[in-house]
Image: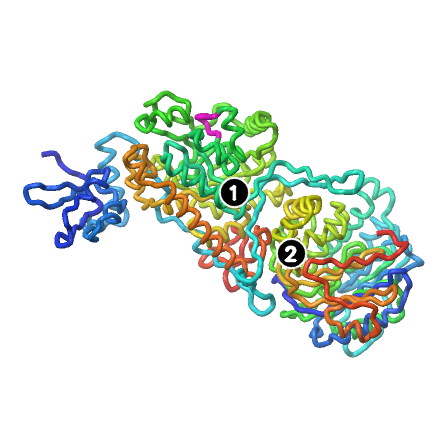
């Protein structure tokens, strides 16, 4: 399998107050950047969309065929209490073809299995996701968080949005991705966002540190099967945030660490902290151009590479925050902005929603 | 007249028209090749004594001299080479073990020369080191598996002892004894100037060089020469030498004639006695014994110094490294079979050990497979010849490299491979005061600084081409390497793809 190199468009919208809004707007935003995609992949992450099942892990799964579905469902039944399952509603449109079977399950780990595993609940879920994705041929879990979901396909992002009827979902945060890969995998799982639990990543760029990052993160039990930069970044976020317990701010300082010359000029406490992070997590430094939007339960984070080699703009209006590869993709949905700016390279923009844990 | 079985390998060719009979060559040659004939007022040479070190050539003011390979030859035979035949003559005469110096010169594959680096095109911009920051700073030492926070939620920044380097290159172990005081001083001062470390080797540390302690690795080898509390505490790190790439499985040997007053004091042995390090450490017959020595040294220095365990690259190197990583060591130095030496039995130097590229790749992979790569830093040595070798070693998975032969070459060494004779005309591998003084530490240190400054520029250029602006993003980044002319097995061990894939 070859490494998957791509350029892209990204967009994200979040309401700080947790007000829910329709997926219509994110489709409109990312559609503006059609030039930055080539129809080989598009996708969305939506947060706050399953309030009625908010305590259950929502698994979105692609199946190649019914045999894979049957095998996967047997596995799910052995490991989880499945509270609800259904096909994910889609609409037939000519732009999106060759769709796999797309199913959704709301689940909780079986208490006896969970206890026997001696793992915490989230780690248990992660391991089950990896077992399905690497062990069951033709089954791929592409979304596994609570009260959120990923929707992705091969196609232009606005078509993918219409295909999934995204306008019918309401959430407090949406991110989107339009893909411009330089090869043609043609596989739905290869589209963005990449996710694990409630962490999702949409990414524009090509990281030169890829293999250093991959070989490092694989030490901790992650398996990078897709050979895309974004998959690695998603696992790195899960590792640093959930398992190591770094804050998002600290993660920004690991991924896009300030240059030593900048660090030397900081006050002592900050300098020592930055030095510690760079030293201890040196293998998780990301070099090369990237802009990413990370979604998580209760918030969103945007980050550029340390040299700002990819465009990324942030806009604010009242309680809404918008991030996109191009300002036009923000203006199209909100032209009356209180503030608009381009964050510096390595300067993380972290937005959290009041009243939602993160 | 005795039969001469062995004929000179080189001929000293003198252009008599250019020669002004200044007799510099005669004075400069410790091997006494050149002789002045008073009657005819001309210089002559005894080729049989020449080691081809170029000292006379380099100092001849009229460029009257050159050393050429002798065309004298045995009857051609691909099996019985002239070298093989000559070595038999030598042993038939002496009854002794053949001795050699410096690294293995034989025709084994050099994997560094069969790997090519990547560069960015279109999808990812290359970075210009003259216009953008380009970072080569590295930290060596064990990294914690988890972090802890204080009551205010701040990260508790307690780390095992670390070494900070301005670039991922250090000077490898060369003992005071095997090389001269001036060579040691040059290395120490260069390390201090460059913000890197040099290594005392197993001969202790001359008291005048204690002031460079922050840039010094003090070595503890099987002979324990010169090891005492102040010595251990004087350095930035302590290295336990278990083996050396040039002579895996055997100890060192410094002949008594090199053990003068200063060396006797530094090594803490009587003047004129041979300094023979045992093949093994006699308190380390197994991995658990190594652990005890690691912790003894840590106890002795209050857990303030990282401990490096240096091993020769041998067949089972990955498993051995895994054991070392679990023994409390902070770093593992792996020395490939082309690594240099001041003296080694020829058969061992030329036939024992592994190429560093393969050893490094398999150790890095093994430690990652076991999830313990962050517990230790890996230092790779054993013939790093250029900045390109450095970059390739880092991409294979090294945190840092050791150089020694390259440093000596910068000081003037011409790789004549005669260190064991103690008559180094360049003042490096000798203790003869008249020869030692030929190496001026003020110049030597500057040449070392120049060399590594140049390498650092080149490393930055190569990194920038790959779109990498910090060296840690290169470490273990094997996708930046492609093999040329390597077979499937070699590619598998190196963990790289073939060019074109």
Q: What is the quadrant of the N terminus of chain A in the image?
A: bottom right
Q: Main secondary structure of the magenta part?
A: loop
Q: Residues within 10 Å of mark 2 (few under 14, many from 20)?
A: many
Query: Residue B485, percent across and down?
Result: 44, 58
Per the image, the residue denoted by label 2 is A286
Q: Is residue A75 left or right of residue B296?
A: right
In the depicted view, which residue is nearer to us: B439 or B218?
A: B439
In the depicted view, which residue is nearer to us: A2 or B21?
A: B21
Q: Please check whether the numbered discs 2 and 1 fall on a single chain.
A: no
The residues tagged by marks 2 and 1 sit, at their Cα atoms, a distance apart of 23 Å
* Residue B24 placement: quadrant: top left
In the depicted view, which residue is nearer to us: A351 or A341?
A: A341
Q: Residue furthest top?
A: B270
In which chain is the residue bearing label 2?
Answer: A
Per the image, the residue denoted by label 1 is B379
| Position above or below: B31 against B383 | above
Which range is magenta? B220-227
Residue at the image point whose x is 41% and y is 26% from the top: B266
């Amino acid at each position: 399998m070859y490494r998957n190199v791509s350029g892209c468009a990204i967009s994200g919208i979040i309401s700080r107050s947790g007000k829910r809004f329709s997926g219509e707007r994110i489709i409109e935003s990312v559609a503006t950047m059609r030039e930055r995609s080539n129809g080989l992949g598009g996708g969305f992450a939506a947060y706050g969309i399953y309030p009625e099942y908010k305590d259950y892990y929502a698994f979105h799964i692609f199946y190649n065929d019914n045999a894979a579905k049957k095998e996967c469902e047997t596995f799910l039944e052995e490991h989880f209490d499945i509270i609800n399952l259904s096909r994910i509603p889609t609409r037939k449109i000519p732009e999106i073809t060759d769709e796999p079977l797309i199913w959704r399950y709301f689940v909780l780990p079986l208490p006896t299995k969970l206890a026997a595993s001696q793992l915490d609940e989230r780690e248990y879920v992660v391991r089950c996701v990896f077992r399905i994705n690497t062990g069951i041929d033709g089954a791929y879990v592409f979304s596994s968080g609570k009260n959120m979901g990923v929707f992705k396909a091969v196609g232009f992002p606005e078509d993918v949005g219409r295909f999934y009827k995204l306008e019918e979902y309401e959430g407090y945060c949406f991110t989107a991705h339009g893909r411009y890969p330089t090869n043609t995998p043609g596989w739905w799982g290869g589209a963005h966002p990449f996710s694990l639990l409630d962490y999702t990543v949409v990414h524009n760029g090509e990281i030169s540190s890829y293999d250093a990052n991959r070989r490092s993160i694989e030490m901790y039990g992650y398996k990078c099967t897709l050979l895309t930069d974004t998959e690695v970044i998603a696992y790195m976020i899960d590792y640093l945030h959930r398992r190591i317990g770094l804050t998002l701010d600290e993660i920004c300082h690991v991924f896009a660490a300030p240059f030593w010359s900048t660090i030397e000029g900081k006050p002592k406490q900050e300098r020592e902290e930055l030095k510690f992070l760079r030293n201890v997590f040196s293998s998780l430094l990301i070099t090369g151009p990237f802009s990413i939007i990370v979604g998580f339960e209760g918030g969103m984070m945007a980050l550029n590479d340390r040299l700002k080699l990819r465009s990324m703009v942030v806009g604010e209006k009242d309680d809404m925050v918008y991030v996109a590869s191009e300002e036009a993709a923000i203006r199209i949905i909100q032209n009356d902005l209180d503030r608009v700016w381009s964050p510096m390279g390595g300067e993380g923009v972290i937005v959290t929603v009041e009243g939602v844990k993160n | 007249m005795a039969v001469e079985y062995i004929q000179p390998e080189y001929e000293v060719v003198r252009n008599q028209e250019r020669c002004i009979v200044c007799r510099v060559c005669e004075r400069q040659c410790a091997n006494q090749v050149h002789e002045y004939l008073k009657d005819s007022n001309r210089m002559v040479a005894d080729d049989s004594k020449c080691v081809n070190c170029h000292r006379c050539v380099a100092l001849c003011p009229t460029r009257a001299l050159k050393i050429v390979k002798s065309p004298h030859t045995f009857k051609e035979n691909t099996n019985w080479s002239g070298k093989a035949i000559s070595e038999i003559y030598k042993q038939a005469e002496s009854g002794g073990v053949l001795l050699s110096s410096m690294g293995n010169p034989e025709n084994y594959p050099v994997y560094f020369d069969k790997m090519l680096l990547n560069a960015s095109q279109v999808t990812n911009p290359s970075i210009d080191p003259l216009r953008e920051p380009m970072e080569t700073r590295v930290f060596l030492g064990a990294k914690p598996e988890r972090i802890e926070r204080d009551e205010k939620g701040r990260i508790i920044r307690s780390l095992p002892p670390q070494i900070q380097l301005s670039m991922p290159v250090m000077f490898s172990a060369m003992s005071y004894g095997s090389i001269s005081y001036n060579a040691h001083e040059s290395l120490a001062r260069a390390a201090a100037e460059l913000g890197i470390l040099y290594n005392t080797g197993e001969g202790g540390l001359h008291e005048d060089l204690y002031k460079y302690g922050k840039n010094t690795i003090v070595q503890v080898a099987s002979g324990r020469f010169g090891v005492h509390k102040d010595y251990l505490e004087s350095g930035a790190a302590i290295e336990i030498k278990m083996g050396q790439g040039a002579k895996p499985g055997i100890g060192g040997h410094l002949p008594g004639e090199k053990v003068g007053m200063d060396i006797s004091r530094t090594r803490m042995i009587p003047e004129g006695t041979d300094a023979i390090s045992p093949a093994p450490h006699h308190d380390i017959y197994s991995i658990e014994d190594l652990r005890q020595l690691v912790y003894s040294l840590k106890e002795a220095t209050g857990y303030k110094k990282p401990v490096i365990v240096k091993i020769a690259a041998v067949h089972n190197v990955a498993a051995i490294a895994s054991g070392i990583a679990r023994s409390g060591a902070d770093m593992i130095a792996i020395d490939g079979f082309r690594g240099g030496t001041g003296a080694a039995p020829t058969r061992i130097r030329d036939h024992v050990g592994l190429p560093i590229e393969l050893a490094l790749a398999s150790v890095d992979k093994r430690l990652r497979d076991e999830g313990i790569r962050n517990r230790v830093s890996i230092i790779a040595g054993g013939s790093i010849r250029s900045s390109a070798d450095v970059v390739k070693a880092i991409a294979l998975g090294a945190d840092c490299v050791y150089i020694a032969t390259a440093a000596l070459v910068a000081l003037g060494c011409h790789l004549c491979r005669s260190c064991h004779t103690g008559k180094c005309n360049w003042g490096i591998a000798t203790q003869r005061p008249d020869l030692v003084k030929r190496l001026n530490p003020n110049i030597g240190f500057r040449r070392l600084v120049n060399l590594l400054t140049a390498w650092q520029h080149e490393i930055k250029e190569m990194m920038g081409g790959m779109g990498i602006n910090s060296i840690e993003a290169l470490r273990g980044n094997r996708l930046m390497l492609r093999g040329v002319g390597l077979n499937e097995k070699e590619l598998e061990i190196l963990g790289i793809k073939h060019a074109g894939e």
